[in-house]
Amino acid sequence: MQDVDISHMQDSYKELQDKLKTSQKRTRGLLDIVLDTLDAKDIDTLCARVLKLLTQTMDATATLCYIHTHDGFYLRGTQSNIDLAGIPHHFPDKVACRQDCLCFNPHELSTQCFTVVSPDEAAVEPLTHKHNASPTTNTYSQDTTPDVVFLRDDKTGDITRLKACNVPPFSSFVSVPVWYGERVIALLLVGYSAVHTFDKSDLDYLNGIARYLSIQLIGAITAAQAQRENRLIATSSKLRESMLHAQEIGLSHVWKYANLAAKAIDTKLIFVCDEKSYCSLYVHSANHQGEPTLFSGASKTCKTPLPAAEFFAQSPHYPAFSFDCPCFSAALGIPKHVSISTFCAQDSLGAVLKDQAIVGTGALVDFGLLGSSRCMCIFVREENSARLDSADLNFLSRLAHDIHDTTTNDQRHACDQHIAQALQTGMTNELQQVEGITAQGIYSSATQTATIGGDFYDLIRLPKCRACVIMGDVSGKGVEAASVSAAVKTALRAYAWQGLMPAVQVRLLNRFLLSFSRVETFATLFIGIIDLQKGVITYCSAGHPPAMLIRASTGTIEQLNVQSGAVGAFSEMSYTDGTTELFEGDILVLYTDGTTEARAQDGSFFGEDGLMDALLRERSQGIQGLPQRLLDRLDAFTSQHLQDDVAIVGLRFDDVHVKVCRDCLLD
């Protein structure tokens, strides 16, 4: 009897020693986890350190960490002493769970212990069927296929029949939710290759680890989300900048940008276009490299591409449309604008892709009509991968709108170019031949693609040895500026032939512009009436840079400084004429503000001083080629990076104070 008591005491003592050792080991483990994770800044580092120490402390086979997203739990970290090939990468939320998949309810999640049991054990215990199916024992007890396992909830005793690929490869495991406030942010799985019984101290310890880990994890998750969103925004900006610098956006460009987008959000890419009224499915390669390859066939047995109408009819965005023929267009009711719809393997679009042997989750991005072509891209992830979240969808939305808007702008620009070319034929800058005046002019656009702009000049021969010189600059660019320029030139020619003085012409033009164009469109003008008999020029400089007069007798430069306000800005603007005397050999130089506002690479302006210096250096070579030489100096100053259009006109007065010129005799 005494021996029995001693033996019992020894067993109790050993049990106490084991519990004390376990408690000490876990205390050290908890301290190590705290110390090792204090400086962890990202999820991967945090998971790696915690899982390693947790596996050692719990003497477990493996420990897994799943991060909760909007549609379930996704594997983020593992620490294992065995090969974890085939481990589930995703556990869906219970509300979206399939019958053969282990799932968790994030709203009612608690620590749960599970054990894999044999079919014989499952045959004598009640089986749980998901979605309120009726329990049975006979059907499942006969199922001994290796791809099926029976999982028992150790707390309730319920047994569930699941696919082996959807269950962690353990004989026993415990799932521990990591709560932050009122929401679950992660799930820890601690597993054992042999059957293991979890006692209260195990669960208390794991729940303590989860409570500590919640603070660390929420910080790492928030930082990771912010970094990812910033990275996607930066990628959007780079793609948009590339689009803006492209000469045009065609289908090949759309493929290029979509390819880069797919890489940014880690998806495969399917490129869909309406060529020949069919959807050509171009399947993106796994490494996001190379040209797309045609994935033809509506099914494995079909050798022809899927008719476009049938394809679009399967899209969640177009369920109500009916197509009378395979060809589709805006006339059939398909939206012209951007739309994005998500999908998974279970919906109608997912079913279409499944017929193409493409199974997964993702988003269909419809770019609308790009010119005459319909273009869509499908971004696909594997079925058990994380679904596209709000950051991904916002990124794709920015991409789609940028492509659509840029393409639309390209089409408008092409139309504008045709209109501008038509306008140009009616308003080519012209310097008429006037006896007694040698005239030279040049116009340079700031962009190679521009065919016309708001800068213009003109020299009009008038009766009685007179001429009218005009230099103008209309605000804005493109067709509107060109159309205003054409109207201004036409009006000024009419005013000049009426014999009106410059200030009167500008005053009439101001009223005309205020009624002709938008409020924010205005013009700067220099109008000069040259009288060769009297040797005088009467001018009105309306907001325009001051003209420069090189005196032949002294080589000095005078500015014509009588200034008035711009044209088309205000109805009550006052305009004043100025006059100056002309002598034989004098050279008048007119220019637009693109000349003096030209900037060097260091940011400095060419300015009026730079122009006067250039004129002093070039005066000895005379009027011939003077505008071109000045433009060459501007190019050298700006390293051929002019930011605005430039127009320059030079007039040399060869015959001044003449009594009667030949033109007057002809008139």
Image (cartoon, helix red, strand yellow):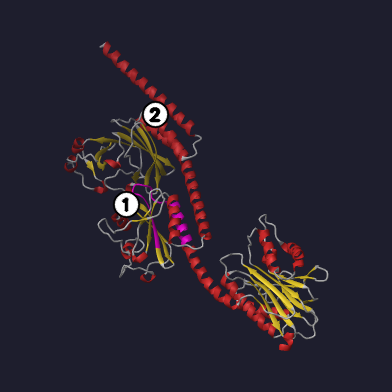
Residue 649, picture quadrant = bottom right
Q: Position of residue 293 (x, y in %)?
A: 36, 55
In the image shown, does 77 or 94 lie closer to the viewer? 77
Task: Find out whether residue 397 is within the magenta segment.
Answer: yes
Q: Which mark is residue 413?
A: none
Task: Name the residue rendered at 30%, 33% in the picture.
Answer: 172
| Callout 1: SS | loop
Above or below residue 227? Residue 433 is below
Q: Name the residue furthest right.
A: 554
Task: Name the residue rendered at 78%, 73% in the picture.
Answer: 586
Q: Left or right of 364: which side holds 459?
A: right
In the image shown, does 44 or 325 lie closer to the viewer? 325
Q: Is residue 214 visible?
A: no
Task: Find out whether residue 522 is within the magenta segment.
Answer: no
Above or below residue 236? Residue 31 is above
| Label 1 environment density (alpha carbons within 10 Å; few <14, some 14–19, many ≥20) | many
Where is the N terminus found, in terms of image quarters?
A: top left
> Residue tagged by mark 2?
56
What type is the residue that disc 1 sits on?
Val
Residue 461, picture quadrant = bottom right
Q: Is residue 95 visible?
A: yes
Q: Position of residue 82 (x, y in %)?
A: 33, 32
What type is the residue that disc 2 sits on?
Gln
Q: Which mark is residue 359?
A: 1
Residue interval drawn in magenta:
375-403
Above or below residue 578? Residue 209 is above
Above or below residue 96? Residue 58 is above
Give how far apart the Cα atoms at labels 2 and 1 are. Answer: 39 Å
Task: Name the residue rendered at 48%, 60% in the picture.
Answer: 402
Q: Position of residue 386 (x, y in %)?
A: 38, 48
